[in-house]
Every structure is written in structure tokens, then in C-alpha cells.
Amino acid sequence: MWFRSRRSGDARCGGEGVMGLRLDLFGSVRARIGGGEVELGSAQRRALLAVLALQANQVVTRTELIDALWGEKPPSSASGSIYTFISSLRAALEGESAPTVLASEGSGYCLRIDPQAVDVFRFEELRETGRRRERDHDSSGALAAYASALALAAEEPLTGLPGPFVAAHRDRLRELRLDLVERRARLLVETGEAALAITELSPVAARHPGHEGLQSILLLALHRCGRSEEALRLFDDLRAASIEEFGTEPGAGLCALRDQVAANDPALLPAAQSVAVRALALTPPEVFVGREDGLAVLRAALSRLDRAGEAVLVEGESGIGKSALLAAALGGGDHRVAAAAADGPAGAAPLQVVLDALAPVTGSEQLVRAARAVDPARPDEVEDLLREVEAVVEQVCAEGPLVLVTDDLQWADPLSLRAWERLAALTHRLPLLLAGACRQLPSHRTPELARLARAATVLTVAPLSSDEALGLAERLAGTVDVTLLDLVPRAAGNPRYLLDVVAAAAAAEPPVHLAGPLPIDLPEGAVAAVAHSLGFLSQDALEVLRRAALLGGAFSPRELAIAAGGGAGLDAATGELLSAGLLVTAPRGLAFRHPAVQESLLARFPRSIRIAMHRELAEALDSGAAPVERVAAQLLAGPVPPDRWVHEWLTRSAADLAAREPYSALRLLWAALASGTAGPHRDRHSVVLARLKHWLGSEMGGTAGRPAAQSGDPAVRAEMRWLMAFSHHRRGDRAQVLADTANALADPLVPAVWRHLHVALASQARCQDGVRRGGCAEDRVEALYLAGRWDELVAELSRTLGSGPAVATFALGHPTPARRLTGALALVTARRDRPVDAGTHLRAAWQVSLDEDAEAEGGEFVIAARATMAEQLGHHRHALEVLSSLTRLHTPLAYRLMPALVRLAVDLGEHDQAKYATLRCERAPDQAVAALRCRALLDHDPLSAQAAAALAGENGDDLDAAEATEDAAVLFARSGLLVEATSALRSAVAHYQELGAGWDVRRAGARTTRAGDR
């Protein structure tokens, strides 16, 4: 992919272009000046002009132009051809007195032109305008902008032009045009213009029979225009073509839509015609697991119904099993049941849900007529109607107990909600079990539903536990294989998503594979079913959720605002998603509750559009000053092929990224160098990659060899030769080190600093037993870690990797500072829930094997990092064995880390080991906080833990304070003091969240919960 947007940070050229020059890149590339068309010549000349036009007002180097036109195998005459093409284009576009259009800038060229004079830029601007107007609910404005954009893009983009650059942009523009066609057609159908949608969509859909988004909209439009038979014939044709070409049925979403059309499903009608209430059958489900507490409450209420009534409100996210719980508890008995459910947000008639629920047991036509005649704006009429409802229910209950169930109350009309509240007040004197369910979470209740909650017993349906989810999957599928073991956690305990995943896996559908660090393996049917289940969301909320999916599982509100393009409706949409339980608050800000939802939304993007969106979002995040690792995540998620902006970003950010996420930096640098498009950035990429591989103890291979031999920069050549020589030094190959340094010193242009470093390395190689210089960096590393200033540790490594002499000086010195820094970073990244990067730092710290004299080698952080990673994998006993080596050390840092050993020893019942470590801390000088923490854990004393936290806070040791507060929360919970435990846990979690310590947040919550259950 060769793609970038125009922004102030790019290399730009000044001056003015020719007035009246316009370029058309849709269709055959054309140039016009003053209304007359300019003869541009051969396809390669026009391709060169297209490359410059798509990067207008920015300098494109000759190397980049060669790569763009010929790729990795240019002809030997490529450079001369570029010069010839530029000369010919200048002659065509510039008159004798006209301003320069094609300017020479350094080693490249720049096309000076107003972006509005290039049709592709106008197309992209209109596309963004339409999307912005759609987010602002300006449907007519959005439709107009989309129509104007599509008019510009009527012809095939960049027709007949050669070269990889043009091919990549041609594919991108095709996908963007298809996306616009789909957006406009969908909006036409939503606004009642289904006939116009059919006219515009039919020819495009015919050319793209495999594009199920287009086909779905066309089927729906035909159905809404009364042409259902034609819609069914279209589906049959699509099905036959799919089977013939791919050997598979159409996707589950399209098949489900066909079934709805065939059944004349009212849900396919426009919103104004939607049926607002559906019948509700309380048939107990065949498969039901868990929910013992909810079942007990409802069945107890049912058992005493002949003596007293009760109102029960069941709350929970979409698909969590509220209706199933009501059916399992209340269905199948011999008591009278009246039930109905609101069916979507379409405006229902006043009191409609209550009337439909009561209809089977009352048959009161008078009540129906009164409801139809009431004026909701007249309080006296509303009050009379509500009293009449009460009278009818009292009459029914006089004949015997009644179970009245109303589901999906979040969509009920206001009068139905008021009637429910009034009936709840009668349950204390009537044999009435009033049960309602609503798709709301306790933290996001609307005011109306909050009043209902105050009038009833509230049951909040939580996600299934891991064991319950696996049990449900086994009962549904008959057995749980390796595939289901991997897929079940994606549902995050939500039965609806779990059912979709199991059904799709049972149908043996192929998985949806997305390139990126974590492939998505959800079966195609599950992708379609989960995406379809989100239909209850507003269009704004659904669009925000789709954009959020690009950000990954967790993200900050600022990142979401960037991804969603801001807009006045963002807060409301985010609130709707939180209320629905699709997003939850998390340490970083927000997160998807269910991985299956995020993965399904991501899989629904066409691959080329998804890559383009990741690319756009990477640049937008960078412009918004997002952390470098978040920008890198977008580039890796595509993966986005490196273009000019990516190379520029890597040049200025790779060292910082390498310190934060070394594995991500390695992958991006490898991809950038392999792309063939690095141009002037190749040396810098090679340098940072070589420094990082050196730091991590990896073999140089060819990483340093090419720039050492070919770079035109003497400093780069000298540094790469030094790194190659040190690689041999690390392996003990003294002769090769001396040969390498002699070869480097023979270069007359080697800078003085590198001449000195080569001489030092050669001297060290000649005297292997010589004393290496020490350092005091370990004291600073320890202080930064214990003070919770973890980002400064990352900055320390970033500064080192940003300077070749700094890397070399570190390497020539004593190994302790380097090992202490990398060990600390391994521990920090492990606690920040980044196990891959933690493992990478850990391997770097073990370049020289630790012996029993671990103190001299700075091994305390390495020990703690290894133990943390073992604990994260559930290997608690192994973690304890690793930490036990701390008792052989006599360093202040070893004592500061000792409470983790005591914690694990107590949890595993190793009392003697915990006591020994505690006594060691208590006898050590200046270790009051560690001693208090160990004693608190050993004696199960929460007050001692609180005292340790207070003392640590006074000393400015924020990390010790947070950990001691976590210990206090656990010990309070174990003592049954849940209020104190909750308060302490909140305080500890707040500290951990400030540090970004996601693992500590999860560990603290899990420990406190387990302690409270004992």
C-alpha cells in the first residue's frame, strides 16, 4: 500500500503552480489548462504524473519514483528515464512565462498544484464531508455529498497506468468508491428512497456479486418496494453463483435476510411501520446453566404467590440471558402467565406493552379503547387510564394468582413504564408476581428505569463464569474440542455470543483470518451472527463501535474520539454503548466487554478498506500525540505496507518504540527494510534495528553488513562496523574483532568518537580479563522503579538507543547497569500485561548467564520478572521457587521484593518459607516497610498492611504503598470486613491504573474476591 494523507509534517515545496491547471485521475489521467487538454504522452509519463499528483506539494525523491514505477526490479536506465519523463512533462505543463509546476528539490521533484484541482482529493474531501454530515444526522446533506463524490469517481481510477504505486492506489480508490455506493444506498433505504437506491445500486451490485453488503441492501430495497419475489430470485442467482464459483453458500447474514424476506418479517419494514410489541412465550429453555441465585429468587417469589406478590426487575446486557432466566424460572408451571415484550425502539401506542401482556387474561376492549383515546399531554386523562389499569389487574388477581411478565422494557412506551411502576406498588396486597426485564446495566439506568428499580427487587444477570461457559458449550456442541476451548473465551460469558460461536463451529465454517499479530479465527457464521445481533444500536453508536474495533480491545477516550472523527454525538453514542454493556470502563479508559464483538466488527471490513483505515488512523493518532506503541499497533494490525509517511514516522519514533515495545519495533523495522521503499530512510532504519538487535543480544546477520559496506555516511559505516565487531566479541572471536576494528580504523573518514570506541573495543578484545568500567546507573534504575516512575525507565532506554555512542559506551562498560535496566523493563512490561515484550527484555537481560553471585550481576529484577511471568501463566509454585533465590541475596532491592515471596508462600501453604523470609526482612537495616508488609501477610493482619502503606507513602514509595494497600484489601476481605476491603481495593487499583499496571489490577481484584469467598 502506497498511501498517505497531506499534513504539515511532510516535506513540502514552495512556490505557485500554473493557474487553471486541473488533473483528473479517475479514468485516463488527463491534465487541463484553461479548459484545454494537455498532451501528456506515454503511459509511464502519465503514471509518473499520477505519482506526483497523489503526493502533491511534497518532495518525492528519484529513488521513490523509481520504486513507484518499476518496483524492486527497475531497469538499468530507470534514473535516466525519470529525468526524461520529468523534462517531457515540464514541456507539456509549463509555458515560457508560466510558474514552475514540476520543481526540482534536492534529489527529488515536487508537483505544485492546488489540491482542489485534483479530482481524487476532491473525492476524498466530499467523502469525509458526507460521513461527517451522516454522523450529525444530516441525511440530505450526506446524500448530496456522497452523490457529488460518486460523480467524480464515475470512471475507473488511473486507467491503463503501470507500476506498483498506481496499482495500490487503484485498488484503494475502487474500495473507497464501493464503500460510498454502499453508504449512499443504505442511507437512501433508511430515508424511504428505496426505489432510487435500487436504480443506483443494481448495476454496481451486478458487477460485484460477491459483495454481500451491496447485495443485502439491494434485497432489502426490493422488499420494501413490494418486489419481494424479485428479491428472492436475486438471492437464488447469487446462491447459485457462489456455489459454482466458491463451492460455498452465501454468508449467514445474507441467508438470514433472505429468510426474513420470504417470511415477510415485519422487522424489515421501515421504522414508522414497525410492530412495537411481540408475543412472549415463557417456554423453559432446553439448555440452561448457572444463574442459581436468580432462579432461587424468582422461584421463591412464585412459591409464595398465593400469600403475597412481588415485583422483580431483571437487568443485564444484550444476550446475557435475561429472557432465558425468566423462562427457566417462571415457565412450564400451572400458574396463570401473561407476557409480552417490546420489540424495538419504534414508537408504540400508549400502554401497548401492558395491554398486549394482559390481553390473554382480560380481553378488556374498554381498556384498549381508553388507551387509544388518551392524550399523553393531559395529566388527568393519563391518571384515569392508570387507575383503570389497576382496576383491571385487581379484578384479574381476584380470580387467582397472576404472573405478569414484560420483557425489553428499555423500549417500552412511557405509559407502560408508569403502569408497571404503579402495579409494582400493588404487589404487597395482590397475588401478583410482576416480572420485567430490561437491557440496561445498573450503572447506566435511565431515570424511568431507575424508578422501576426502586420499586422492585433487582436481579443483575452477570456473565457466565469460565466453567459455566465451557459447560454450556459442551451441552450445546456435545463435546468441547481444542477449537472451542480457544473460541469460548471470546464470548466473555455472554450466552448469545457463545451460542453463535458454537453453532458456527459445529457447521465447520471456515475461520475469518486477518493479518496482524493476533489472527482472528472466529468462524464466518459467528462473525455474521454477532454483527447482526448489534442491530438494536442506533446508527451513531454502531458507527462508533465499528471505529472502536480498529483500536483493538482497549483504548482511551481520546483515541476513540480520534478514530470516530469527533462530532457532537460521540458522548451520547459512547454512553449508549456503555449502557448496552458492549463497552466497559477499563484501566486505559474503555474496552470491549466481549472480544467476539470487536473481532466480528473488524472482520466485516473488506481487507483493503481495513488496511487503509488502519493507515489513516495511525497517522491521526500520531497527529493527536498518542503514544508511539498505539501508532505502531495500527501499522501492525493491517499490516500496513510501508509508505513514505510510515518511513518518516519510523525514522523519528523507532528508538522510542524499541524501548517501549521492542518486538513491535523489530517487526516494523524489518518490514520497512524489506519493502524496497525506504529510500533515504534505509540507513536510519538499519541503524536503529542494529542497535536494538545488539541490545537484545541477537546476532547481527546482514542487518549491519549492508550499511557498513554501502552507506554514504561515515558515522553510519563506523557504527555498523563497531556493532559487527562487538557481536564477534560477545561470541569470544578475538581474531575477528581485531580484524573488524582494524578494517574500520583504516577508513580515513571515520569520526573521532567512533575511532576512540573502535580502539577501546580492540583493547578489550586483546585483554579479555581486563577490568570493565563500572557505573552507577543501577541506583537510578532502582529508584525510578520503586517510585513508580516507570515511563522514565523507558525513556532511559530510548535515549540510549537513540545514540550510537551511548549504546557502545554501555556495552563496553560493566554488564550490571545494562542488566539492571533491561531486568527492570522486563518487570515493568510484565506488570503492564505485555508478556511478549517482557520476554524480549528478559532475554536481553540474560545475555550473560547469572551465577550465584546474582547481586553483582544486578539480577533482582530478572528474578522478579521471571516470577511475575510464571504467576501470570498460573504457575504459582514455580513463581515461588524463582523468588526463593531472593533469600540468598543481601541487597536492599532483594528485601524490597521479598513481600511477593511471602504472599505466594502464604497462599500455597508454605508457612515456614514465609516465616523465614519475614524474619530476614525484619533483621535487615532500613527495611521497615518490607518488614511490616511481610509480617502483615504472615499474621493475616490488615492493620499492619495499612500501616506499611502509610509509611511507604510518607517515604514517597508509591509502588510499595499500592502493593501494601492491595494486601490490606485482601486481609480485610478474609476477615469479613468487606466495606474496608472494597475501599482499600479501590485505592490500590487507582494507584496501579496510574502506572498502567494491568496485571496488578487483575491480580488485586482476583485476590480480594477469593479472600472474600472464603
Image (cartoon, grey):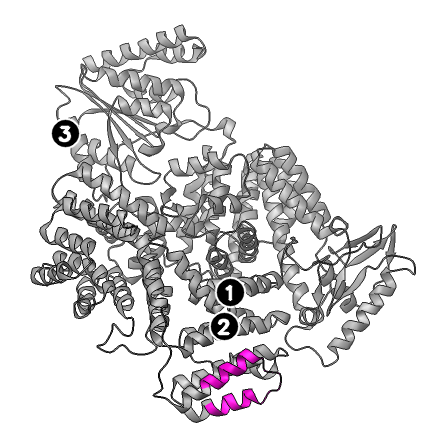
Q: Which quadrant holds residue 210? A: bottom right
Coordinates of residue 335 in the picture (x, y in percent): 18, 25
In the rendered image, the vertical position of residue 105 relative to residue 444, given as above or below: below
Does 693 appear in magenta?
no
Count how many numbered circles sit on residues in the image: 3
Q: Dot 2 surroundings within 10 Å: few (below 14), some, or many (20 or more)?
A: many
Q: CA distance from mark 2 to mark 3?
A: 67 Å
Q: Earlier in the sequence, mark 2 or mark 3?
A: 3
Q: Dot 1 surroundings within 10 Å: few (below 14), some, or many (20 or more)?
A: many
Coordinates of residue 705 in the picture (x, y in percent): 53, 83
Most foreground residue, 657 or 740: 740
Residue 300, numbered label: 3
Residue with the mark numbered 1: 654
Q: Which residues are magenta?
A: 738-761
Q: CA distance from mark 1 to mark 2?
A: 9 Å
* Label pair 2/3, CB-CB below 8 angstroms: no
Residue 689, numbered label: 2
Which amino acid, mark 2?
Leu
* Label pair 1/2, CB-CB below 8 angstroms: yes
Residue found at x 54% / y 34%: 568
Q: Earlier in the sequence, mark 1 or mark 2?
A: 1
Task: Give the side of residue 309 with respect to residue 378, left or right.
Answer: left
Does 748 appear in magenta?
yes
